[in-house]
Amino acid sequence: MLRVNKLKFTVIVLAVVLIAVGVKAYLLYQTISPNAISFWQKSNTSSKKVINHARWAEILSKYLSGDGNQGVRTFNYQGVTEADKVEMRLYLQHLQSIDPRDYHKNEQLAYWVNLYNALTIDIVLKHYPIKSIKDIGSSITGPWNITLANIAEQPLTLNQIEHGILRGLWQDKRIHYVINCASIGCPDLPLTPLTGQEVEQQLDSAAKRFINQSKGVNVVGKTLMLSSIYSWFSADFGHDEQQLIAHLKQYASPVLKKKLEKFSGVTEFNYNWKLNAVL
């Protein structure tokens, strides 16, 4: 009788765990779907106001490696001084004191991208040293469902900024190339803050950079090796592989473009979650 009761208890515990995991997985799926958060749809098309990202520019200039080629940019988390950590907090406080809906749409886009990237660096700094950003928070959702900011009295997570605002409102596939998740496999952190005035050129430049990096797109024999970004967010890049390749060819170098035009093999996806830290 005791053995039966133990078995029942074990089954109940297992069922509870499976339900909890299922609920978390469902919530994660719901979170990363590009469902626009209507609260943030407002903008001021006549506004010429510019948001100051000087503090973020200074942080990037000090700690982000600029390799000048197609190598991977890394961030010197270990080298960030206490004074600059204060500057990071002041920058994030500044952004959270702003209601981006009062600005032009391009200025808003730059604002949200810079905020996302700065919040990501900030949360890594708070937990450093770590091997991967996935070591922060829940084992399923990582740090992306943790409330990290409060804008216009609206609490926000990284997932809400990325999927509910950036992907949800702009629906521009190039956004994937300018937001960074502090990982080697992710599109590199932009060397300078995005600005409303230059955001179009910055989006194009970031798309060209990632697509021509081996971690983004690489043709090896009859295998097309792609970043998992193109699998996770496949709906953003077209309804089929043909549309995806058309997008890749748009930004590919002449050599890569020729390879993509001739490609007729299999496609595989890969992603490196190792922290993008200076070794």
Image (tube, rainbow, N blue to C red):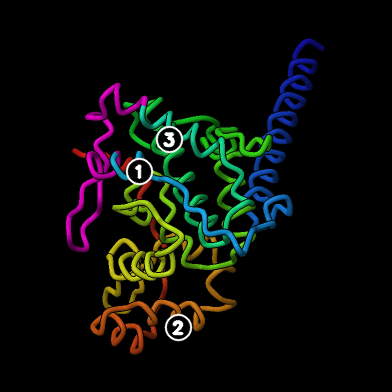
Tag 2 residue: 246
- Tell me what residue is drawn at x 36 percent, y 30 percent: 87
Total numbered circles? 3
Residue at numbered disc 1: 54
Q: Position of residue 246 (x, y in %)?
A: 45, 83
Q: Is residue 137 left or right of residue 262?
A: right
Q: Is residue 158 magenta?
A: no
Task: Name the mark on residue 91.
Answer: 3
Q: Residues within 10 Å of mark 3 (few under 14, many from 20)?
A: some
Q: Residue at (52%, 72%) from the top-left corner?
A: 237
Q: Secondary structure at mark 3?
A: helix
Mark closer to the chain start, 1 or 2: 1
Query: As displayed, is residue 255 above or below residue 209?
Result: below
The amino acid marked with disc number 3 is Tyr
Q: Local crowd at mark 2 within 10 Å, few (<14), some, or many (≥20)?
A: some
Q: What is the CA distance from the residue labelled 3 to the residue labelled 1? A: 9 Å
